Image (spheres, grey):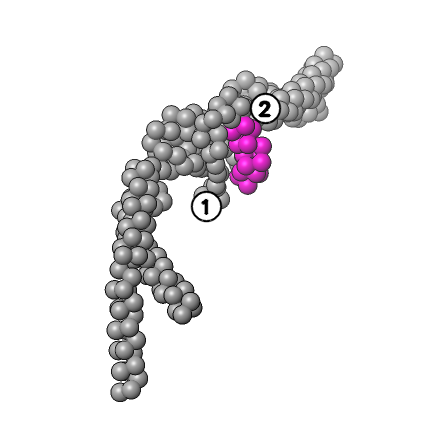
Amino acid sequence: MNHQASDEIDLIELWGILRRHARLFIGVSLSVLVAGLVYAALYVPRYDYNVTIQIGGMRDKSAFDLIDKPQSVISALKESIIPEVISKYAATHPNSPISRIKIDAINPLNSDVVVLTARGTADQQADVTSLLNTVVTSLDASHGSLLKLRIDATKKLLLTEISDANAQVVKLVRSRDEITRKGGASDQALTLLLLDDQISKLQTYLFNLRQQLEVGLVADVRMTKEIAPPQRSVTPSGISRSIIVVLTVLLSVFVAIFFVFLSHFFQLAKE
């Protein structure tokens, strides 16, 4: 009972303190409330922008070999390509808030795609989209150079195989012609059949190599590209105006109570 009475007296005393400092309470709470409402009115919603990129590569026999591993692509984007693109933009737009934008790169589910993400206002959509497209273009150019090196190496290998196969065909044809010129004895008939079979197989092999050289390389190449153009989220990201208003109301009450009791404490200290 005594404990409950003590609690009741304390609550009454606290209420009395608040009543004695009503002006301070109202003044502080209104100040915080007005500041919060002004901030909410001036607050500009921000949206998420993203673009999805598919990493290119070449088909090597039955497997598709990516130009680079996804994690290596992300490292190149974060450490080199993205900072360079933003730096160039900042040099030509020194006073633009876009020059301080943060572009991130992620690899969802360890797949062959990379997603670029950025955040900006609705008014900044054109600039953010342009920056994302520039990053994609830079990555595509970098991968294009790597892909050209691979294509050149594959062409060189195919030309070497074609040259070797041609040399074998010439050698086999000479052997066959030499046997035929000598009369093609009956004991050489089986040898001639084997030679013809080897020549036929090599010619088929040469045909396939030439087809791969002329057509297959282009068909088996996939450039790094956007799967879809940059898109903006439908709803704003982060805190909304309504949440700011609610938090402002709560904060104004707590701040006002704090100042009231702080003022009361200093009054007691003077006494």
Q: Which residue is mark 1?
A: 109
Does residue 95 sit above or below 177 in this rendering? below
Q: Residue at x 32, y 50 (%)?
A: 32
Observer-nearest residue: 169 or 254?
Answer: 254
Q: Residue furthest bottom?
A: 1
Q: Which percent across, then down, holds residue 120?
A: 39, 34
x 48%, y 29%: residue: 99
Cβ atoms under marks 2 and 1 closer than 8 Å:
no
Instruction: State left or right for residue 267 relative to residue 186.
Output: left
Q: Secondary structure at mark 2?
A: helix
Q: Residue at x 30, y 84 (%)?
A: 3
User: Which residue in the structure is indicated by mark 2?
Assistant: 145
Q: Which residues are magenta?
A: 66-87
The mark that comes first in sequence, 2 or 1, is 1
125 versus 182 height, above or below: below
Residue 216 in the figure: left or right of residue 190: left
Which residue sits furthest top? 181
Question: Does residue 242 belong to the magenta stretch?
Answer: no
Question: Splitting the image into 4 quarters, where does residue 7 fall?
Answer: bottom left
